[in-house]
Image (spheres, coloured by chain):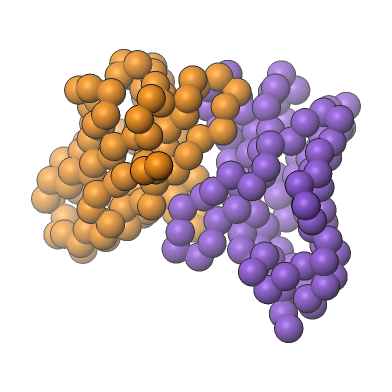
Chain colours: A purple, B orange
Amino acid sequence: RKEVEQDPGPFNVPEGATVAFNCTYSNSASQSFFWYRQDCRKEPKLLMSVYSSGNEDGRFTAQLNRASQYISLLIRDSKLSDSATYLCVVEWAGYALNFGKGTSLLVTP
Amino acid sequence: DAGVIQSPRHEVTEMGQEVTLRCKPISGHNSLFWYRQTMMRGLELLIYFNNNVPIDDSGMPEDRFSAKMPNASFSTLKIQPSEPRDSAVYFCASADRAWNQPQHFGDGTRLSIL
């Protein structure tokens, strides 16, 4: 099983700050990439897919660098409700998703 | 629309007992996945079904674990006999086509083996 590595954090940031998470993966053949969000004692939920050209969804921007096998997530204007664990997810073997252990974010007033 | 439905939400039982976890995938999804999540190991894929057929069970930890999918709307994960190290949160997820698609998770079953 190929690995997905994330900084576990925690990242403590004030409301309104911009925060970035990074993730590296080892399977150069992976074709699909996602960011999931998991709240405490809840299930993982899809936040956004990550496309080669980079993509944005409101305050969230995801970037993919295939050459460096690196994925990033940028959150602008952080809200208290953004506090959660963010899971970097990389497809392997076509059907399976390999989940990183997550980066914990705490947004403070 | 109903999401992935799992039951029970919580299960506490003594070691040696049989445990059965249940999952109803999203209607129309033909791929189903069972995961286990612990603090130490994160999310681990246990088994993957496509069109009700087990495709990859290499993540099933040992023979005490078994999974079935008798039809497109129901799957079970069974542990017999259970051990304290099986304590974890077990998630079921489904996807519309397996390849390169995001998966949608159920609420999970929080299992404690005493």
- Determine the residue positioned at 41% across, 26% down: B29
| Left or right of B114 in this view: A108 | right
**Rendered residue at 24%/31% (across/down):** B74
**Residue B40 to residue B1: above or below:** below
Q: Nearer the viewer, residue A27 or A73?
A: A73
Q: Is residue B10 above or below residue B23?
A: below
Left or right? Give the position of B49 relative to A98. left
Residue most extreme to the bottom: A109
- In this view, the residue farthest toward the front is B1
Placement of the N terminus of chain B among the 4 image quadrants: top left
Q: Is residue B14 visible?
A: yes
| Image quarter in which the C terminus of chain B is found | bottom left
**Residue A80 x/y as whole percent:** 68, 73
- Closest to the observer, A54 or A40: A54
Residue A68, x across and y down, in percent: 87, 32
Which image quarter: residue B113? bottom left
**Between A80 and A91, which is closer to the camera in this rendering?**
A80
Placement of A68 over or under B31, stated as above or below:
below
Quarter-of-image position of residue A14: bottom right
| Residue A47 image point, x, y percent | 64, 47
